[in-house]
């Protein structure tokens, strides 16, 4: 029996200036493992915060604890960066909050996970 793997687009930013942009909440409860990826094609400075909620955003847990997710830092150049989940995932609802502090940013944020 093969395990399934999916790529879920959490956020797409196109020439977004200095601001904080929250993605929609996405249900990732069916995944056992995975990682968040940020692919930046036009760089300003973006600092992601990955947030979770047991109830689609009513109760906010932010950020996802460092014991469960590698701690994200600022990204300031085009390229890709990966933030792996540590151990088996127990993510209910997740969103990314992208703080853009320098210039405009074009980037996509993905979750690639295994069921």
Image (cartoon, helix red, strand yellow):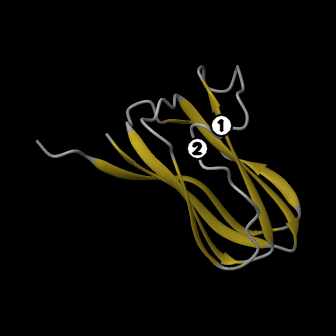
Residue 51 rendering spot, x and y as whole percentages = 67, 37
Residue 50 rendering spot, x and y as whole percentages = 66, 44
Residue positioned 85% across, 67% down in the render: 17
What label does residue 79 carry, if any?
none
1 to 19, vertically: above or below? above
Q: Is residue 90 left or right of residue 21?
A: left
- Screen quadrant of the N terminus: top left
47 to 81, vertically: above or below? above
Residue 27 rendering spot, x and y as whole percentages = 50, 33
Residue positioned 70% across, 20% down in the render: 58
Q: Crowding near pointer 1: few (<14 within 10 Å), some, many (20+)? A: some
Residue 45 found in image quarter? bottom right
Q: Which residue is mark 1?
A: 64
Cα gap from disc 1 to disc 2, whole angstroms = 6 Å
Residue 62 found in image quarter? top right
Residue placed most toward the observer, 115 or 107: 115
Q: Crowding near pointer 2: few (<14 within 10 Å), some, many (20+)? A: some
- Screen quadrant of the C terminus: top left
First in residue order: circle 1 vs circle 2: 1
Q: Are marks 1 and 2 in contact (CB under 8 Å)?
A: yes
Residue placed most toward the observer, 22 or 84: 84
Residue 71 rendering spot, x and y as whole percentages = 67, 50
Residue positioned 56% across, 31% down in the render: 93
Q: Which residue is mark 2?
A: 69
């Amino acid at each position: 029996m093969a395990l399934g793997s999916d790529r879920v687009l959490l956020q797409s930013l196109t020439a977004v200036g200095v601001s904080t942009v929250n993605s929609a909440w996405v249900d990732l409860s069916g995944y056992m493992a995975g990682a968040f990826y940020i692919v930046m094609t036009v760089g300003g400075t973006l600092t992601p915060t990955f947030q979770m909620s047991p109830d689609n955003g009513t109760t906010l847990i932010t950020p996802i604890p460092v014991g469960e997710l590698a701690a994200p830092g600022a990204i300031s150049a085009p390229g890709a960066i990966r933030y792996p989940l540590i151990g088996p995932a127990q993510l209910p609802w997740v969103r990314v909050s992208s703080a853009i502090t320098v210039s405009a940013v074009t980037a996509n944020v993905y979750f690639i996970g295994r069921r």
